[in-house]
Image (cartoon, rainbow, N blue to C red):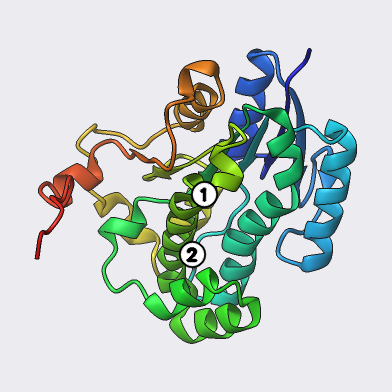
């Protein structure tokens, strides 16, 4: 039986590479993006998410084996933070929840969300944005993110995704149905998102200052290969993991912050 997968942000970058990788592994993949996908939908709106969920359920006929929500936006000086709250967080979480029954029906489903190493290497993450997202209050998350700016809200939305994934991964409604939820924390990957940031006259000059011990930025195909592993039978023991794939940036800047021994106080 052919395995089914849904990938958002499938027209470029990590999403496109993931769609190709999963198809090479035998999956039938349904791509969703703003333009140029199997379904064009705006995941920054409730209407777009509902449309995406409806078409995805029709595609998989009620049984979904993998969901990889890659769609997202980066922070830019002139971009409202509210866009990031709606697309990055709610465009990820609402889709996962909307397809939960289909993922449960698989009996061995994989969900791989996209967080970021900005959650650990960027100082001053606005926790009010994180909290509003985790309360699932989109109106509050949008207004709080606008007040914080999109540059600060980017790591906030990605922190919220990571914490939501970890909390849900061990919930019986997922794990007892064989579904395993994880997230990746990529560093600087050569995608349209990074190209957009480099082209910005205000922040572009800072991109090449990011230390990457590996000596180069990452490639979408490298991230997709890890996603494909997590969606394979060999990835079943990853549950609630946040996997860094950033060329060593986090290890360099926060060497002893992880692992962090549990306090007995």
What residue is shown at x 76% (from left), y 52% (from top)?
Answer: 34
Picture layout, residue 233 above or below residue 231: above
Left or right side of 77 for 23: right
The residues tagged by marks 2 and 1 sit, at their Cα atoms, a distance apart of: 21 Å
Which of the image's four quarters has the C terminus? bottom left
In the rendered image of this protein, does residue 213 appear above or below residue 91?
above
Specify the quadrant of the image occupied by residue 125.
Answer: bottom left
Which residue does the image show at 61% across and 77% down from the upper left?
137
Residue 154 visible in the displayed image: yes
Residue at x-position 78% and y-position 12%: 1
Q: Name the residue under label 2.
A: 157
SS at badge 1: loop
Q: Is residue 80 visible?
A: no
**Residue 31 placed where, x, y %?**
75, 37
Q: Where is residue 229 in the image (x, y as percent from the top left)?
A: 49, 22
Circle 2 packing at 10 Å, graded few (<14), some (14-19), many (20+), is: many
Asked whether, in this view, residue 66 is left or right of residue 31, the answer is: left
Residue 62 lies left or right of residue 146; in this view the side is right
Image coordinates of residue 188 in percent, x first then y, are 38, 45
Left or right, residue 102 beside residue 166: right
Give yes or no for contact between labels 2 and 1 (Cβ–Cβ under 8 Å): no
Kindly identify which residue carries mark 1: 171
Q: Find numbered disc 2 in the image and state the secondary structure of the residue it sits on.
A: helix
Using the image as rendered, state which of residue 1 and residue 249 is in the foreground: 1
Please give the label number shown on residue 139: none
State the count of labels: 2
């Amino acid at each position: 039986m052919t395995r089914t997968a849904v990938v958002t942000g499938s027209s470029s970058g990590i999403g496109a590479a993931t769609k190709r990788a999963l198809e090479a592994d035998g999956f039938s993949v349904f791509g969703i993006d703003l333009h140029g996908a199997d379904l064009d939908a705006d995941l920054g709106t409730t209407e777009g998410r509902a449309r995406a969920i409806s078409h995805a359920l029709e595609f998989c006929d009620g049984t979904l084996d993998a969901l990889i929500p890659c769609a997202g936006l980066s922070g830019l000086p002139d971009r409202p933070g509210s866009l990031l709250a709606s697309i990055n967080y709610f465009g990820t979480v609402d889709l996962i929840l909307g397809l939960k029954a289909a993922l449960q029906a698989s009996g061995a489903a994989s969900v791989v969300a996209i967080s970021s190493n900005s959650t650990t290497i960027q100082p001053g993450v606005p926790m009010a944005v994180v909290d509003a997202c985790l309360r699932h209050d989109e109106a509050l998350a949008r207004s709080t993110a606008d007040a914080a700016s999109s540059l600060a809200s980017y790591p906030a939305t990605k922190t919220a995704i990571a914490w939501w994934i970890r909390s849900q991964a061990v919930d019986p409604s997922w794990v007892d149905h064989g579904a395993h939820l994880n997230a990746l924390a990529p560093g600087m990957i050569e995608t349209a998102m990074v190209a957009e940031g480099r082209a910005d006259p205000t922040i572009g000059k800072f991109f090449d200052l990011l230390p990457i011990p590996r000596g180069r930025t990452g490639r979408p195909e490298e991230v997709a290969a890890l996603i494909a592993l997590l969606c394979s039978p060999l990835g079943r023991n990853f549950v609630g993991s946040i996997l860094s794939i950033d060329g060593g940036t986090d290890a360099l800047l926060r060497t002893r912050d992880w692992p962090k021994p549990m306090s007995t106080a």
